[in-house]
Structure formats: C-alpha cells, structure tokens
C-alpha cells in the first residue's frame, strides 16, 4: 500500500458515515431461517440423485475465462460473465455455469475412472443479469451429468432423475411438464427449407426467445432473417409436432430419438413429457437431445430448469470427446415453484431444547448439565443473557426451539429440572435421563 492509499483509508475510517447493510446488487444474504430452507432443498436434491448413485464433486468458482468463450454461447460468455484480470494479468471469470468446469475435470481425470461417470454438484454460479423475478446475479444450481454410457439410456435416466427430484420435493406429475426436443430435427428442417447456413445460428437464437415474445414479433423477426418465402411455411411447420413428423417422416433419427424417450419414460411411469420442436436452449454445446422443465400452473408458466446432450465439450481440453448429458436446476426459480405449489420446506432449528437459567449468575453448572444432555445426542442451546425468565422464553419461542429447561441453584442441588414443552405449555419435573427420553420421543 502506498502512503497515499493508507492516508485515504484512515480518512475514510474517520468519516463517520456507515456502510450499507445491503448485499451487492442481485445477490442474497441467507439469514439462518433462509439457510435452513436452502439446506433442506439441497438435502432433497442430494438424496434424490444419490439414489441413482451419483457422486458429488466441486471446484473453485474462479476459472480461466477461455473455457467459456469457446462454447457457452455469446450471451453467457460475453454479456453475462464476470470477467477480471488477476494481479498477474490472467483473464479469469466467476463461473456462470458448471458445465465447462465438469468437462475440464473429466477431460483431465485419472484414466482409471471408468465410464459411465455419474457426478453431481450444487455450486454457486454468477451471471451479470438484470435482477428480476427468477433471475439473480448469483444462484445455486444443482448440476447432474452423465459422461459415457449408451446415449439413449443416459438421456432417459437424466429425465428419471428429474422426475425423482421433483417428486422428492412433493410435486405431483401434474404440477410440472418436461418439454423435450432434438436439435438435429431442427437442423433437418433448416436443410429442408433451405435456410441459409449463415442464418441458422440467428434463427435458433430467435427460437430460443420464442416464448418471451409475441407471435407477431416472432413472425416479423423470422421473416427479416430468412425472407417471407421461407419464414411462412417454416413458422407453420414449427408450430406443431405433427407437421414436423409429417415433413421429416417417422424414421428421422431425431424424431425417433424423441419418440423413443417418450416411450421409455412412459414405461418408467413418467407421463408428463411433451415434444416441443422449437425448443433450442441457449448453449452452443448442446448437439441433440435438449429438455426444459416447466411449471404447469397458469400463474407461473415458466421454465424451471433444463439441460441436454453435449457430446464434444471435453474435446476443448483433450483429444478424447466423451459424450455427455445433464442439466442445471437453479434454486431461485425452484423456490418460486415450491412456494406456488405450497411445498416449500419450513425452516428448522437445530436446538432440541434451550436452557433457561433461573437465578444464578454463574453458568458453570449450566454448561456441565448441557454437556451431559449433549452426550445423550441432543442439541442444547443456552440462554446466557441473564435476562428475566419471560424474556428468555420469548427468545426460545422465536427461535422455534421446542423445549425449555429451567435451571436454578435448587435444581442443580436436587438434580431435578422443570422441562416445558413450548408448543403445548406442558411442564414436568424430571431428572436428566427422563428429560432426554421425553425430548427424543417428541421428535
Ligand atoms: P441454464 O439453462 O443456463 O443451463 O441454467 C440452468 C438453470 O439455472 C435455469 O433453468 C435456471 O433454473 C437457473 N438459472 C440460470 N440463470 C439464472 C439466474 N441468473 N438467476 C437464477 N437462476 C438462474 C446451464 O447452466 C447448463 N450449464 C446446465 C447443464 C448442466 N447442461 C448440462 N449439464
């Protein structure tokens, strides 16, 4: 630090103005109640994917910028990624997604890890977006991916995992729908309608935005891209799966892929798949199967999360291209969904009981009693405020602690304590073993 910088810091410290308590724009603080809800969401995610044997991995949120520039798509890589220069002049980024990271890790893996690889992670990811409902600048995103394996089976398994997670949260199959498509179908349609090669990327980008704009705006944009001779029949074909099947035939590989998936999932008891021929998804790396999960509630008909097949991303890092499929599920949109359907987990408190000191100033004996109770496997909170009993009870109730244990000098002497169930107001005088039993039985 230069002397000028030090002086600046000291002067700023002298100035009595306070710093804002607000977090940075578009990111969240998690107070304990919010953190408890988030942890329970993570627990449902973990439990669901571990049922299928997925292993958890993680990595640093800082990555070399180059890994996003090749394949993530211009919008993510250039407009939405936090890019920095580090002190040595390296271009680095805060990860806007996890897929390039897992591809890097798999490409660099010890060859002894044999395929198929099933991995999951719940990283925080960062995107410089305009904060709005469902869109923030930092969110947590469950990533579930399979590398290797039979592609059609892996695609189907990924959708089974989606179903497992959603039902794990308590959603029923009518609460959400899974739109699926195969990008090769679109490629075949573009060929059939002679969409100029140099326009294909823009047409696909337009399709990706189709749900967000009116039909008139979509039709006009398509016409300005490819001319009315192509745009009119193209828009019509794309409006219905039946037209697509009629045009390309039932033996078209992409169509077979989609129909095969619908059949496989039906066989597994999952019946909420919809063939959506205009579904593209934003990333350049998806090469065939893509899907997106939607809320069916008419108030909240939005995309919840999605993913797809990306068979060549590891090719950025090594000569071996390992086919892969997976998805990313963000916690922000998911929480909106869970709230809409009244299935958001309630926050929990870890403490099973709170010790309320009645008349002593020394807490030594209280801590010893607490230690004994903890040895029996219960979590014990101690109020060390020395406030009146009423104020201590109020604090326990506001922290949702189910029991209060009153300890004063007399209780310590007699080894009998008053235990109060703060939910029913029932109070009993008990010894330590009995206290543990009552609290454990009430769980
Ligand atoms: P994505 O569609 O960009 O895919 O993001 C996945 C999900 O993350 C979204 O559907 C949404 O739930 C959530 N999400 C994305 N951006 C935001 C944001 N700004 N604020 C809140 N939530 C957000 C991917 O990222 C792919 N890498 C997923 C993947 C994994 N594909 C294969 N494996």
Image: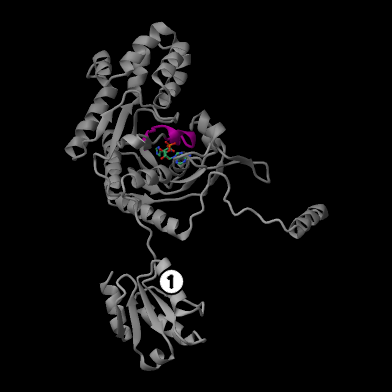
Q: Residue furthest top?
A: 229
Magenta-span inclusion, residue 316: yes
Q: Ligand 1 sits in which quadrant? A: top left
Above or below: residue 99 compared with residue 168 = above
Q: Residues within 10 Å of mark 1 (few under 14, many from 20)?
A: few
Above or below: residue 322 compared with residue 347 = above
Nearest the camera: 80 or 199? 80
Nearest the camera: 382 or 94? 382
Residue highlighted by disc 1? 394
Q: Position of residue 438 (x, y in %)?
A: 27, 77
Q: Position of residue 434 (x, y in %)?
A: 28, 83
Q: Residue furthest right?
A: 3
Q: Which corner quadrant of the image does residue 307 belong to?
A: top left
Q: Is mark 1 within 8 Å of ligand 1?
A: no
Q: What residue range appears in magenta?
A: 305-320
Which residue is drawn at the image coordinates 29% and 44% (left, top)? 161
Structure colour scheme: one colour
Quarter occupied by the N terminus:
bottom right
Which residue is drawn at the image coordinates 59% and 41% (left, top)? 92
Apparent side of residue 2 relative to residue 442 in the rendered image (left or right): right
Magenta-span inclusion, residue 43: no
Q: Which corner quadrant of the image does residue 340 belong to?
A: top left
Q: Which corner quadrant of the image does residue 207 belong to?
A: top left
Q: Is residue 382 visible?
A: no
Which residue is drawn at the image coordinates 28% and 69% (left, top)? 443
Number of marks drawn:
1
Q: Position of residue 110 (x, y in %)?
A: 43, 47
Apparent side of residue 427 relative to residue 196 in the rendered image (left or right): left
Q: Position of residue 109 (x, y in %)?
A: 44, 46
Above or below: residue 256 compared with residue 328 = above
- Is label 1 in a helix, a strand or a loop? helix
């Amino acid at each position: 630090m230069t002397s000028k910088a030090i002086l600046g810091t000291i002067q700023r410290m002298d100035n009595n103005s306070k710093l804002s308590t607000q977090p940075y724009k578009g990111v969240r603080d998690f107070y304990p109640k919010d953190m408890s809800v988030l942890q329970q969401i993570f627990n449902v995610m973990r439990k669901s994917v571990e049922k299928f044997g997925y292993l958890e991995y993680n990595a640093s949120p800082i990555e070399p910028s180059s890994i996003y520039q090749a394949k993530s798509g211009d919008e993510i890589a250039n407009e939405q990624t936090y890019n920095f220069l580090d002190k040595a002049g390296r271009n680095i980024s805060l990860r806007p997604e996890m897929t390039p990271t897992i591809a890097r890790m798999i490409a660099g893996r010890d060859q002894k890890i044999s395929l198929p690889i099933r991995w999951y992670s719940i990283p925080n990811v960062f995107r410089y977006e305009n904060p709005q409902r469902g869109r923030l600048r930092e969110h947590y995103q469950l990533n579930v991916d399979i590398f290797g394996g039979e592609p059609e089976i892996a695609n189907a398994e990924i959708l089974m995992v989606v179903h497992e997670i959603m039902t794990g949260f308590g959603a029923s199959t009518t609460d959400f729908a899974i739109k699926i498509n195969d990008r090769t179908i679109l490629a075949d349609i573009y060929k059939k309608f002679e969409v100029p090669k140099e326009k294909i990327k823009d047409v696909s980008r337009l399709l990706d935005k189709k749900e967000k704009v009116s039909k008139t705006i979509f039709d006009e944009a398509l016409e300005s891209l490819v001319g009315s001779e192509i745009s009119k029949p193209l828009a019509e074909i794309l409006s219905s799966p039946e037209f697509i099947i009629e045009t390309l035939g039932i033996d078209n590989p992409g169509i077979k892929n989609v129909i095969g998936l619908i059949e496989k999932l039906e066989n597994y008891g999952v019946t909420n798949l919809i063939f959506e021929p205009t579904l593209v998804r934003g990333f350049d790396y998806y090469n065939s199967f893509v899907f997106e999960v939607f809320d069916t509630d008419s108030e909240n008909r939005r995309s919840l999360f999605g993913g797809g097949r990306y068979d060549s991303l590891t090719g950025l890092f090594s000569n071996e291209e390992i086919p892969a499929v997976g998805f990313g599920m963000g916690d922000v949109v998911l929480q909106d969904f869970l709230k809409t359907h009244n299935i958001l987990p309630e926050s929990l408190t870890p403490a099973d009981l709170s010790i309320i000191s009645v008349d002593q100033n020394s807490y030594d004996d209280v801590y010893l009693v607490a230690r004994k109770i903890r040895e029996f496997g219960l979590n014990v909170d101690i109020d060390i405020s020395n406030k009146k009993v009423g104020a201590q009870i109020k604090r326990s109730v506001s922290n949702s602690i189910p029991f209060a244990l009153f300890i004063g000098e007399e209780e310590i002497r007699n080894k009998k304590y008053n235990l109060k169930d703060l939910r029913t107001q029932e109070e009993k005088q008990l010894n330590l073993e009995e206290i543990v039993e009552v609290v454990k039985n009430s769980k």
